Image (cartoon, grey):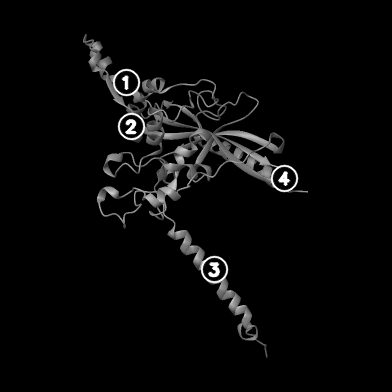
Amino acid sequence: MRLQINYNDSYPFLKKEQMKLQNIILVILVLVLSISSASAQRNILNSEKAEDIGQKTIDQLMNDNDMPLPYGFIDERDILWSKATWEIIDLDQRVNFPLYFPVEKASIGTDRISLFEVLLTNIKNGNITDIYSKSYFTEKITYSDIESRLVFEDFTFYDKQVKIGIDDPNNIDRYTLTPKDIEKWKIRGLWYIDKRLGELRYRIIGICPVAISAQGKKDDTFKDEVELFWIYYPSVRNILHEAKAFNTKNTSRPISFDHILNSRRFSGIIYREENVYGNRDIGGKKGYISENAFMQLLESDRIKEKIRNIELDLWNY
């Protein structure tokens, strides 16, 4: 005969402690869900006029201390190991859609705009000044330098007219780049081991929107990618924290672009790593694996696995 003991009957104080713990968890959950969030749905239940939707109340403005989580100071002596990587975020992948949509902000309002629109708007009004032409941040550029990259010219029709003797510059098709023309994002980051914490960490250094040239849009076999500009990421964290992306799981709790990028809630493929060969690319015209996309993906996974193993080896004795 097996003896069964009911601990709740034998030890009633355990049941009380369990109930207290459940009540505490319930209170914490209610408090978290009741915190007001900055989004297009802000004050939608308390607004008397449609114009008040999305606007903070006076009390909210006075108590608003919502800031991005600051980076801690990292002493050079605390970095046990580090490696810089460059990644491509393909916006055709569903997990990366929050970084792409919406492509037409007029249809749903001004509160929800794409990541590219956030950066470009703040570059125009002068809020973002740390703009560079390359990912090494050696050549600084301005918005006037970027404007020429935002206008694509297609000479297909013009060349046909020239052949029959019609030389008219108006036959050159020109169009201004829009958020829907952004095909990818490139990011440069640094993986490092903090020996004080004993863990592998990651920090974004730069971010760059990538579009396909006019010729690339006409001919699928010719995908000429254009890096529009590089932005030094730590200088734009406050701006990206204020801009909110769509949360597919809970529309009342939007996610800031800064949160998405810092928490790596995206799918990226490494296309370059810091190496002795001048940081050469994996693929492309100057890469060491060309014309073989599958092997390029395997090489990217190999680099990721190598970085992960660094942390695992740290705890092997």
- Horizontal side, residue 201 vs residue 113: left or right: right
SS type, badge 4: helix
Query: Mark 1 near mark 4, Cβ–Cβ under 8 Å?
Result: no
Which residue was labeled with disc 1? 153
Query: In the rendered structure, which amino acid carries the disc numbered 3?
Result: Ile
Placement of the N terminus among the 4 image quadrants: bottom right
The residue lying at 36 percent from left, 25 percent from top is: 150
Q: Quadrant of residue 6?
A: bottom right
Q: CA distance from mark 2 to mark 4?
A: 46 Å
The dot on residue 24 is 3
* Above or below, comparing residue 224 to residue 112 in the picture: above
Give 101 or 94, whichever is nearer the viewer: 101
Which residue was labeled with disc 4? 314
Which residue was labeled with disc 2? 178
Query: In the rendered structure, which amino acid carries the disc numbered 4?
Result: Leu
Query: In the rendered structure, which amino acid carries the disc numbered 1?
Result: Glu
